[in-house]
Amino acid sequence: MKLKLPEEISSPQDLKAVIIEIRAYARWTAHADIKKRVHAKTRKHQSEQPELSPAASALLHAWGAANSLSVAGFDQLISSLERVIEHSPVLAITLAAPPSTGLKKTLVTWCRDNIAPNVLVTFQFNSTLLGGLVVRSGSHIFDWSFRRQILENRQHFPEVLRRV
Amino acid sequence: MKLSTFLYAFLIVDVFFMGALASVALRHAYAHFRPDRHDGEKSRKPYENGHLPPSVREHLLEAAQKNFQQVLNTSADELQKDLADSSERIKELMDKIGNEIVGNEVEFYKQQLQALRKQTTTDITGVQTELTAQQAEMKAKLDADIAVEKQQLVQLIDTKLADAVASFLVDSLQHNVDLGAQAPYLTAVLEEHKAELAKGVSGEA
């Protein structure tokens, strides 16, 4: 099955954190399965279920819909996620201000719809950009910031000043 | 005998005595005003023809001339000496008076000069004080005017600059940029450069 990352997971760091959560959850599931098999019902041997982040929950739900959530299934999921980290393109988007969660989701969705399905996006901010965005992909840098547009247009400033 | 008869007789006797006394008085008065010469005088004879002898006359004339000359020389010497003394005294007096007058005038001139200097100093001090006050007033007024004008210019520059920057931003960004909500603008920019971005990403991959 083709793995589709949820919107909440945008950057490689998010993905690594989710992998750690899923590993812990897989370990707990395996332990719980063993306990279940040996009928260990005493409260002393029961461990609490690790809490999952919304991103990890969404990913497990999506994965569990088509695959079994067995130990092998978890391993396969983790392998798939690690492959995503290794092979998916990574975009670094720099904005003029720290992006909100909504804006992050909007931009990640657009990138996965229009650039690549599992593209990973990291966000940074630099207030000197004034506005717009700078997108870096590997060695390519696409500067669509206000600062660049203003600087490109600076030779027209005296004309504008005269007009005023 | 009657009394009147006696009185007539007495008056007649009195008139007689009075006539006698009047004649005696006349004789004395005449002798007093026209006395007779004494005997010595009556015997002295005058010079013949009324003139002195020539030798006496020449001697007297020489003596008189000598005396006159001596008196004249003495008088001239005394006069010259007096004149010299007078001249010296007049000169000293003139010098003294001149010095006194000049001293007085110089003193008066000094006093006048001192008074004028004092007056001038007072006037200059007053003028300087007034000038300083006027300068301070003018400076304060000028500073206030400059501050007002500067404020107006700053406001004008601010307004013009704000207009210029706004116009420049509108011209530069060429979008209806909403600096508060960036999401539509950012997606629009990405959409506009989608092909370029996809090419860049695929090139990296």
Image (cartoon, coloured by chain):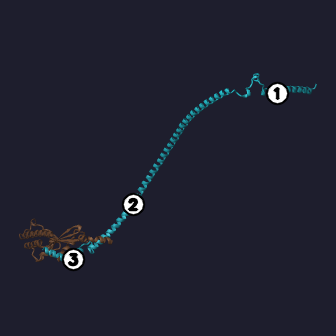
Chain colours: A brown, B cyan
Q: Position of residue A4 (x, y in %)?
A: 14, 75
Amino acid type at mark 3: Glu
Secondary structure at badge 1 equals helix
Task: Name the one closer to the observer, B202 or B84.
Answer: B84
> Residue B26, labelled with which disc?
1
Q: Nearer the viewer, mark 1 or mark 2?
A: 1
Give whichever of discs 3 and 1 has the lower sequence position. 1
Nearer-N-terminus badge (1/2): 1
Q: Which residue is mark 3?
A: B192
| Quadrant that contains the N terminus of chain B | top right
- The circle on residue B144 is 2
Mark pair 2, 3: CA separation: 56 Å
Residue neighbourhood size for the residue with mark 1, other residues' Cα within 10 Å, grouped as few (<14), some (14–19), many (≥20)? few
The residue at 43%/56% (across/down) is B134
Q: Which amino acid is tagged 1?
A: Leu
Which chain is mark 1 on? Answer: B
Q: In what element is the residue under mark 3?
A: helix
- Left or right position of B15 against A93: right
Give the total number of marks visible in the rendering.
Answer: 3
Does residue B48 appear left or right of residue B131 in this picture? right
Circles 3 and 1 in contact, beta carbons < 8 Å: no
Q: Which mark is residue B54?
A: none
**Kind of residue at badge 2:** Ala
Give the secondary structure at mark 2: helix
Q: Residue at x 73, y 28 (%)?
A: B50
